[in-house]
Amino acid sequence: MPRSTPDSMSPDGPVPLALPFGAIGLVGGWLTADSFHLQPPYEAPRFLLAGVTPITAALLGSYLTKRIGGVGSGGAATSSAGAGAVEAAPAVGAGWMEGPGRWTRRGPIVASLLAVWAIGVAGVVNGMTIGLMVGPAGMIIGAAFGAVFSLPFIPALAVVLLAANRVGRARAGSIVASADRRAVWAATAAVIAVAALGARALFGAPAAPELGRVVAGIGLAAVGALLVVDAVAMARVLALPRRPMGAGAGGGRGDSGEVEVEVEATGEAGGKRSGTGVGMGERVDLGLGDEVHVEVVRPTHAYRGARQIARIVRGDRERAVAALRAGLARGGIALAIGAALWVEPWR
C-alpha cells in the first residue's frame, strides 16, 4: 500500500453545529410565539423570538461542536507508514483518550447531563435577552420563561446531538464517515419537519399554516433525498464481494498512486497461487476496521505481465453494512413519523 498521510487515516472531524442549531432555533422561536397566540398588532415578541432564538441556538451549537462526538469509536485508526508497509492500530482504547468530544469521553450519562445543562442555560440567556427589551423586570420574567421553553428544545436538539456523536467513529472521507456527516443534516431536517407538523396539535392553529406546511415539506424532502444517497452507498458496499480474490500488503511506488501488493489468487483449478499484483486500482475505504482486501485481474496472456489490481478495499464490510443499515432505519422512522403527522394536521 502507498504511504498514507495522518489526515487520511485520522477520525473524521466534528460537524459544525451552529447552522443546524440555528435553523432549529429559528423554527422553534416562531413556534414558541404561536404558543402565545399573538395576533396583530401585538406581534413584536414573535419577531424578537424568531430573531434572537436562532442566534442563541447557533452560539450553543458552536459551543457544543467540539464537546460532543467522535470518541470511543473503534473504527478510526492511528497509522504510521513504514518503508513499504502500513501498520494500522485499532483505536478502541486510543479513541477513548483522544478525540474531539471533550464531554463524550466522560461517559454517556455525564455527557447527556452536561448537554441538558447547556441547553437550559441557553434558554435562560435567550429569555433574558428578549426580556431586556422591556427593562430589568423583563429580564427576570424572561429568564423564567426561557427556562420553561427550553424544555421542548431538549429532545429536539438531542436528536441532532446523537447524530453528531457518531461523527468521528470512521476514518475521514470513508463511506461510513460521509454517511455519518449526512445524518446530522438529516436529523436537523427531520426535527424541523416534525416540529412544524406537530405544532398544530400542541398549540392549535398556527399563525401561518401554509408556511408551516412548506417548511415541513422541505424538511421531509431533505430527509428523503439524504436517505436515497445513503441507500446508494449501502448498495455500493453490498456489491463488494464477501471474500475478495486476494488480500495482503506491499510497498508503494511513490506518489503516483500505483502500488505493488503481494496477493494470493485462486486459479481456475481451485488451487491458490501466490504472486504479485501491480496497478492503480480503485480505492474503497469503508471507514470501520483496518482489514485490507485486494482484488486482482489476471493478465490476458498467461506468460506476460503481472496481475493487475482492480480494487483495494479497506475496512470491515459487515460493520459498514450494519452502520449504514442503522442509518437507513433511522431515516425511515423519521419519514414515517412525518407522514403520520402530515395526514392529520393538513387534511
Image (tube, rainbow, N blue to C red):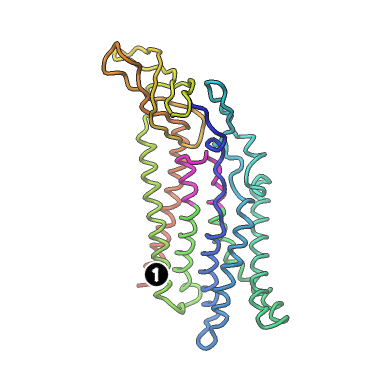
- Label 1, on which residue? 214
x and y, in percent, of residue 258 in the image: 42, 26
Taking the spot 67% from the left edge, 76% from the top edge, the residue there is: 142
- In the rendered image, residue 47 lying in the magenta stretch gets the answer no
Relative horizontal placement of residue 24, taking residue 339 as reference (left or right):
right
x and y, in percent, of residue 192 in the image: 48, 64
Give 188 or 285, whichever is nearer the viewer.
285
x and y, in percent, of residue 176 in the image: 47, 41
Relative horizontal placement of residue 333, taking residue 49 as reference (left or right):
left
The region drawn magenta spans 162-183
Taking the spot 59% from the left edge, 72% from the top edge, the residue there is: 52
**What amino acid type is highlighted by mark number 1?**
Val
Q: Please, is residue 302 above or below residue 131 in the view?
A: above
Name the residue at the left extreme.
Answer: 301
Q: Please, is residue 228 above or below residue 296 in the view?
A: below
Q: Quadrant of residue 225?
A: bottom left
Q: How many marks?
A: 1
Locate the C terminus and report the quarter of the image it occupies: bottom left
Count neighbours of disc 1 (C-alpha within 10 A) and say few if under 14, some if 14 to 19, many if 20 or more.
few
Q: Main SS type for the magenta part?
A: helix
Q: Please, is residue 212 above or below residue 8 in the view?
A: below
Q: Quadrant of residue 74?
A: top right
Q: Quadrant of residue 133?
A: bottom right
Q: Please, is residue 98 above or below residue 329 in the view?
A: above
Taking the spot 43% from the left edge, 29% from the top edge, the residue there is: 257
x and y, in percent, of residue 289 in the image: 51, 32
Name the residue at the bottom extreme.
Answer: 41
Give 167 or 333, whichever is nearer the viewer.
167
Relative horizontal placement of residue 287, taking residue 138 as reference (left or right):
left
